[in-house]
Every structure is written in C-alpha cells, then in structure tokens.
C-alpha cells in the first residue's frame, strides 16, 4: 500500500504571484510515487549547483540537472511526518516555488512536506469531526496598528450554542508567526483527533503574533524586556477581551492555560507565572525564562502552588536550551514549586514540539 503525499494549501499563500505561477507551471514538486519515494524538482537553468536540504536527514542531497534546466532528485523513502525542506541554489537557500505550502516564518526559507503515517499520527488529517480556525484582524490600541490573531474552535462548537469551553493560549517561536501552530504545527488536526478519541477536552485556542515590536535580537536585553511587556499588554488587554467578546469561553483561571514553543515558551512562563489570576496551567516547550521575570512566584511558593494546577516543562536532550531548562527545574525544586519535567529525545524543532502538544493537550482542563 503506497503512502499518500498530502499537500494542503498553506492559508497564508493561497494566491501565488503571477511570476511564481509561470515558473512552476510545468514543474511538479514534490511528487510521491507508489513505492513511497518522493521526487523534488526545480527549474533553474543558469544554476551551477542545486542541493536539497530536508529535515528528515542531516545530509544534503545533490540534485541532478536535466537538459532543459530542470534539477531533480528522488528520495527513496522518507519517514512519515511533517517535514521542512529547502533548495540551496548556488549557496542561496530558497523555498520550493512549485509547492504553495511554506513554513510560516518572518523570512520564509522552507517548504513543507507532509507524509501521513500508517496508522495515522495525531497531526495527520483523519476522518473525524473537525473544528474551525477563525482569522481576526484588530486594531491594537497599545501598539497603534493592525494586528492578527487566529482562533481554533472545537468540533460542534458552532452548532451547540449553549456550550462554553476552556481556553488555551498557544504561542509560536521567534522565527515564526501567529499562524505557525496551524499551518506547520497542525495543532487544529491534533486537537480534532484527540477530542474525537476522548483524550482531550474540547477547547478554544487563541494564537497571536508574539512579535509586538518586531523581531528582537537576543543580545538586546532592554528591547527584549520591552517586547515581553508589550506582548503581555496586548494579550491581556486586547486579545483576551477579543476572544471573550466573540466566543463562549470559561472565565475562571482553572479553565485557562498558556503555552508555547521556544520564544513562546518564554512568554508562557513569564506571563503565566506572574498572572496566575488568569492562567492556572502553563506549558513550556523548549522555552527558557530568567529568574527575575518570575521572581514573585518563586518568592511565594505556597501561594504559587495553591493557584497553579499544572506547570508542564519539556525539552529535548539535544536542544541548545537544555542547560537553561535544567537550571529552571533546579530552581523550581529548590523552591518547592510543583511541576512536571519531561526530558525527551530530539532537538529544537517542530517534530519535537508537535509531540509535546499531543502530550500536553491531554493534561488540560481535567
């Protein structure tokens, strides 16, 4: 039985430019065959070298040039998963112009290849009831400009007008955008599948842009502090009220959670630990936080434990932020603050974070 190659249109790239359409009109890439192999193609007539870089392997794969300037390579077998890949053309990294599905980033350099598993993985599209993803534009008064948010509602929410749901705020990483958890993380399918299996509670998920001041380098300490404060202000004073106005969300802290990956994990920790009046559950996926940013929670461990339902922290053994996570865990242990710590295989990448969401979602609002 051959594996089906899934290529869903990325929501952010539904309308390619005329130039892209012309360039890719005669090119099919990626293309799966019956044996499970996948062929990648790129038309680059003047290129001297084209390399395929795929997340499923550490080795670059040289592509072969045909007489018409079409470069291609066939990979015999790629494991099931949602993978990033790029072409490197004479040293320049680009996305696949024939594939409309791109990883949502501040600067897009990777396309997406989704190979479903057999049996299906939690992030694969399955024949179960599906929720909806809503897009919102709003004027941020604190920032003085238009902002974007995406909101997931669970299956059946629109029909059951009496239903109220718990709320999860789910944040992206530093190089990504507010749509990353849907377009690349497949969070909506993960939740659809878990809810259908009765492994997760139906919930509403809010995803906002975590860069209120634009991307800030790690060494710009003051600017990062200002960005964190701007994020908290926008979330608490604007995005949460927007959700409360448009959706039936439960108001109590026990029915609200905040989580994120990498930068989003930092935002979740620093926001959640200082606003336990808003969030009783916090999740950090490969995140890190400075001690001073959660000092109040650390200095009042009994009060923190009384308010906190779940503090869930996970990091991969090859993640560059592992040492900072271990420091945080040591600090929490020293202060006697209850938490769950998960040291897993993997590095700082989406294949790890999808698994974290699968595990974390099953813990929520029980």
Image: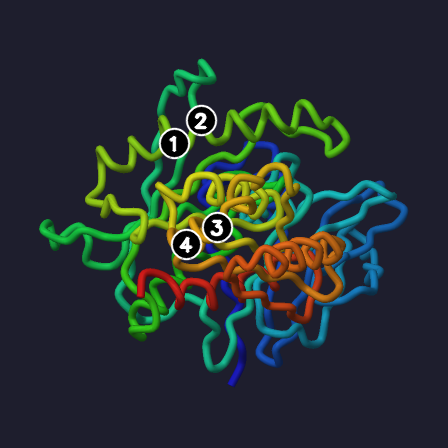
Q: Which residue is mark 2?
A: 233
Q: Which mark sits nearer the N-terminus, 4 or 2?
A: 2
Where does residue 62 sit, x and y in percent of width and height?
84, 60
Q: Which residue is mark 4?
A: 308
Separation of residues labelled 4 and 2 (CA atoms) = 22 Å
Q: In the displayed structure, would residue 65 be above or below residue 239? A: below
Q: Which residue has dot 3 on it?
A: 259
Task: Measure the alpha-carbon separation of dots 2 and 1.
Answer: 5 Å
Indicate which label's residue lies in the foreground, 4 or 2. 4
State if disc 3 and disc 4 touch (CB < 8 Å): no
Q: Give how far apart the Cα atoms at labels 1 and 3 are.
A: 15 Å
Question: Judging from the image, what secondary structure is the residue with disc 1 in?
Answer: helix
Question: Which image quadrant is residue 351 in?
Answer: bottom right
Residue positioned 66% across, 72% down in the render? 78
Quick check: can you spot residue 204? no
Image coordinates of residue 156 in percent, x first then y, are 19, 58
Question: What residue lies at 72% left-to-right and 60% top-to-bottom?
Answer: 54
Q: Is residue 151 visible?
A: yes
What is the distance, in whole Å, between disc 4 and disc 1 at their CAs?
Answer: 18 Å
SS for tag 4?
A: loop
| Circles 1 and 3: CB atoms closer than 8 Å | no
Compared to residue 81, the image places residue 285 above or below, namely above
Pick out the residue farthest to the left.
162
Q: Say which element carries label 2.
A: helix
User: In the depicted view, which residue is nearer to us: 341 or 192?
Assistant: 341
Q: Are marks 4 and 1 in contact (CB under 8 Å)?
A: no
Q: Which residue appears farthest toward the bottom when viewing the image?
A: 1
Q: Which residue is mark 1?
A: 236
């Amino acid at each position: 039985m051959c594996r089906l190659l899934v290529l869903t249109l990325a929501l952010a790239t539904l309308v390619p430019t005329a130039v892209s359409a012309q360039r890719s009109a005669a090119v099919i890439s990626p293309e799966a065959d019956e044996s499970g192999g996948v062929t990648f193609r790129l038309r680059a007539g003047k290129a001297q070298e084209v390399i395929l870089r795929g997340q499923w392997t550490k080795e670059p794969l040289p592509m072969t040039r045909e007489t018409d300037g079409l470069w291609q390579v066939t990979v015999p077998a790629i494991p099931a998963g949602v993978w990033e890949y790029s072409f490197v053309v004479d040293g320049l990294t680009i996305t696949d112009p024939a594939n409309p599905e791109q990883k949502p980033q501040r600067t897009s350099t990777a396309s997406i290849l989704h190979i479903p598993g057999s049996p299906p993985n939690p992030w694969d599209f399955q024949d179960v009831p599906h929720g909806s993803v809503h897009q919102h534009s709003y004027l941020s008064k604190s920032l003085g400009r238009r902002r974007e948010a995406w909101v997931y509602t669970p299956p059946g929410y629109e029909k059951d007008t009496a239903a109220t749901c718990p709320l999860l705020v789910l944040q992206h990483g530093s190089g990504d955008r507010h749509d990353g958890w849907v377009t690349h993380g497949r969070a909506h399918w993960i939740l659809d599948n878990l809810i259908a299996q009765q492994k997760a509670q139906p919930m509403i998920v809010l995803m906002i842009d975590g860069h209120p001041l634009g991307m800030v380098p790690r060494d710009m300490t003051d600017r990062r502090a200002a960005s964190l404060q701007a994020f908290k202000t926008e979330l608490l004073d604007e995005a949460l009220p927007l959700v409360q106005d448009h959706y039936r969300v439960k108001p109590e802290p026990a029915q609200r959670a905040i989580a994120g990956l990498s930068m989003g994990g930092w935002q979740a920790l620093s926001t959640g630990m200082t606003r336990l009046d808003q969030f009783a559950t916090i999740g950090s996926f490969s995140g890190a936080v400075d001690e001073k940013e959660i000092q109040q929670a650390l200095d009042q461990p009994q009060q923190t434990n009384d308010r906190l339902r779940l503090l869930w922290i996970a990091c991969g053994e090859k993640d560059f932020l592992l040492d900072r996570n271990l420091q945080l865990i040591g600090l929490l242990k020293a202060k006697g603050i209850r938490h769950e710590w998960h040291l897993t295989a993997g590095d700082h990448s989406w294949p790890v974070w999808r698994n974290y969401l699968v595990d974390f979602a099953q813990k929520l609002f029980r």
